[in-house]
Image (tube, rainbow, N blue to C red):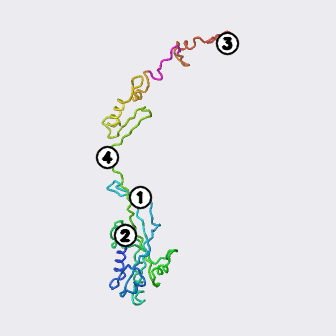
Amino acid sequence: MDSVIPEVDFALRSLIEREAASGTEVEVVFDAPTKDWAGRRNVPTIDVYLYDIREDLRRRERGLVNEYDGERIRARRLPPRHFKLSYLVTAWTQRPEDEHRLLSALLSCFLRHDAMPEDLLTGPLADLGLPVPITVSLPPPEDRSFADVWSALGGELKPSLDVVISAPTDTGQQYLAAPPVVSPGVLSLGGLGKWPPRESRTRVAVAPGGGGQSASDAAGSDSAQDDAPADASGMTWQQLAASGSGATHGPAEAAPPAGEKTLSHKGSDDPAGDQSATAGRPRRRRPGGISQR
């Protein structure tokens, strides 16, 4: 808030001088209205004293706000926080009637605006592009009364307006985004104990006629196959996977162990197979003398 409060002070002074004290010789100051200060005043004065600063929790927002550079996110920052700046506005003249006229003009001035006019905002307050709400003469909070304010100032109780400005304030907390990705991604796969061997592939543009496989994929696959160890049959694990079998004979074509006969399945059309399947089985006789294998 290194510059927000001075910007709000400037906007308040400009608004009062333009709409409440126009054409008069009234002076606008921001001094504390103490008894000693009041004794030194000899010209009509409107005093705008800042006596309290609190965050407006009802306006707090969560999350992050993106900042764009074209179509790319350049950074992320916390949303602005709103702070209520409470001003004690009083009029000082030689006669109470003149003070009442000034207070009436001030009240009308603030009631005409729900927010600070945009042409009076400057600096970071204007750069945020957010409204700056104004409230006037609302009931004070339960933990504070105007009598306590005047007692703290050491002065006598005087008619006044309580003007509250909710000023949006940039927190200054910004998180820069990572640089854009300009190189292709690399996928690295591998097993435990160096088997299967680790293989890295880079996905880039699809090679012409590659059937959906990128040129770098093909290169990475070849290099991985060259470095991969061979199994007992002299083939790498990539070649075995491509051939669909892990040995010279497939699982369906594996040779039977020595000394074991091959039995044909039930319903086979091969007579020789049926004979071999029934060889060595004892014959059974049905009642009536008909033998059956």
SS state under label 1: loop
Q: Is residue 265 magenta?
A: no
Q: Residue under circle 4?
A: 182
Image vertical order of residue 89 relative to residue 180, above or below: below
CA gap between label 4 and label 1 equals 26 Å
Tag on residue 11?
A: none
CA gap between label 2 and label 4 equals 41 Å
Circle 1 residues within 10 Å: few <14, some 14–19, many ≥20? few
Identify the amino acid type marked 3. Arg
Q: Residue at x 38, y 30 (%)?
A: 228
CA gap between label 3 and label 2 equals 113 Å
Magenta residues, start to end: 249-261
Sooner in the amino-acid sequence: mark 3 or mark 4: 4
Q: Is residue 253 magenta?
A: yes
Chief secondary structure of the magenta portion:
loop
Residue 116 or residue 60, whichever sits in front: 60
Q: Residue under circle 2?
A: 4
Q: Which residue is drawn at 58% across and 13% down?
A: 278
Identify the amino acid type marked 4. Val
Q: Residue under circle 1?
A: 64
Identify the amino acid type marked 2. Val
Sooner in the amino-acid sequence: mark 2 or mark 1: 2
- Coordinates of residue 186 in the picture (x, y in percent): 36, 40
Q: Is residue 111 left or right of residue 70?
A: right
Tag on residue 286?
A: 3
CA gap between label 1 and label 3 equals 92 Å
